[in-house]
Structures are given as structure tokens and as C-alpha cells.
Image: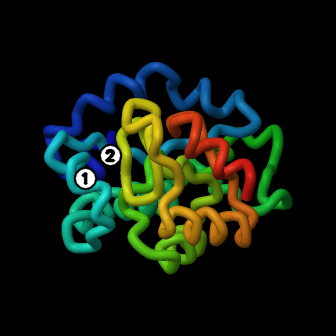
Amino acid sequence: ILAKILENPKLSHAEGRAAQLPREGLLKLDLVFSSLYRRIGDDMKSVAQEASRTKQWPIKQDLLKMLEYYRSTGDFRVIEKPKDLQLKNEDQANVVLHLEGGDILTEPDAIEELYERGVRSIGPVYSHDNQIGGGASGDKKRGLTPLGRELIDKMMEKGMIIDTSHANRKTAQEILER
């Protein structure tokens, strides 16, 4: 599915995951957190700390295509507020859109843009260090950066869910203390 959305056969690895829980299974669940994630290579991981809009642009474009897919298909109901949740729905799966890894968040306005598109949950780091803070596999002494503090504050202001599962201990603690 992902390869079709992005028109990129290199992303076909995700199709196997889609088969793990078929549509019939999704419809039996009350709510699904659906990760918007684009696997990146070491070349992109190495520039993640730069917060470069230009370098992150191709990744951002792919993630925006994924967002549009959720919006355009009749298979999903994107949950943006509690009243959107409809239990016992037989036609659409209720999904909360979750950005897995915040490498594309190069400025606070990016939070606003994603929020307007329906994203309600963000994992600021995905294992590697980025412009927001330290990842679980990165520098253990690295915490939130000044940009990271701004972005986390913006997420909190919007009432978003902040997933610290892939952050290192220092970054996760600093997020929790905000």
C-alpha cells in the first residue's frame, strides 16, 4: 500500500506489515494509532540534526502523501477530537494519526501544519539523534535542543500526544518536565 501511495517500489517492505492486520481486523478495533513513518537511510539520519527544510523536503513530501491517503480513502475515519470517535462502525477504522520521528519538524509552524492535517500524536525522535533531541540509539547525554523545547511546547499547546518511546532517557525526562 505504501509503495502505491508514494509510487516508490523501494518502499514495498511496508506491504507485508499491512497484511498483518487485514481490513476486517481493523474494523473490529475501536481505535488505531497509525504511524506515519518513512524509513530513511544513514545519509538522512546524518543530516537530521541540521533542521534543514531543504534536506528534509523529500521525506516531508512522502509523509504528506501518506496523510492525504488517509484523508482520501473511505477506509479510515481520522480522529481529531473525541466526538469524532464512532464505536461499532462497520465501514471505517477509527485512526489517530501519529508522526513517527520528528526529523521533518524544522520550525514550530510545522506542528501547526501537521495539526491542521489531522496529526494528533508525535514521536519527536526515532532512535537516532535529530534537531529535537537525543534518540534511544544516539548520544545518551543529548537532551532537548532549543528548537526541541519550542516544538514540544507547541505540541503541548495544541494538546497533542507526545510519544517518548524512542527518545533517550535525558530527552524523555526533559519532555516530561515541560
Q: Nearer the viewer, residue 174 or 67?
A: 174
Task: Report the residue at 68% width, 46% height from top.
Answer: 94
**The image quarter in which residue 68 lies:** bottom left
Direction bottom: furthest residue: 109
Identify the residue under disc 2: 38
Task: Report the residue at 73% width, 71% height from top.
Answer: 157
Q: Nearer the viewer, residue 67 or 130?
A: 130
Q: Nearer the viewer, residue 111 or 87?
A: 111
Residue 135 lies, with reference to residue 111, above or below; the image says above
Task: Report the residue at 18% width, 40% height from top.
Answer: 42
62 with respect to 79 (left or right): left
Under circle 2, the secondary element is loop
Q: How far from the left and from the top, in percent, is residue 129?
A: 37, 45
Residue 136 lies, with reference to residue 80, above or below; the image says above
127 with respect to 59 (left or right): right
Q: How far from the left and from the top, in percent, is residue 167?
A: 52, 39
Task: Report the residue at 36% width, 40% height from top.
Answer: 128
122 with respect to 31 (left or right): left
**The image quarter in which residue 34 lies:** top right
Residue 20 lies, with reference to residue 154, above or below; the image says above
Identify the residue under disc 1: 6
Graded by Cα atoms within 10 Å as few (under 14), some (14 to 19) or many (20 or more), the crowding at tag 2 reads some
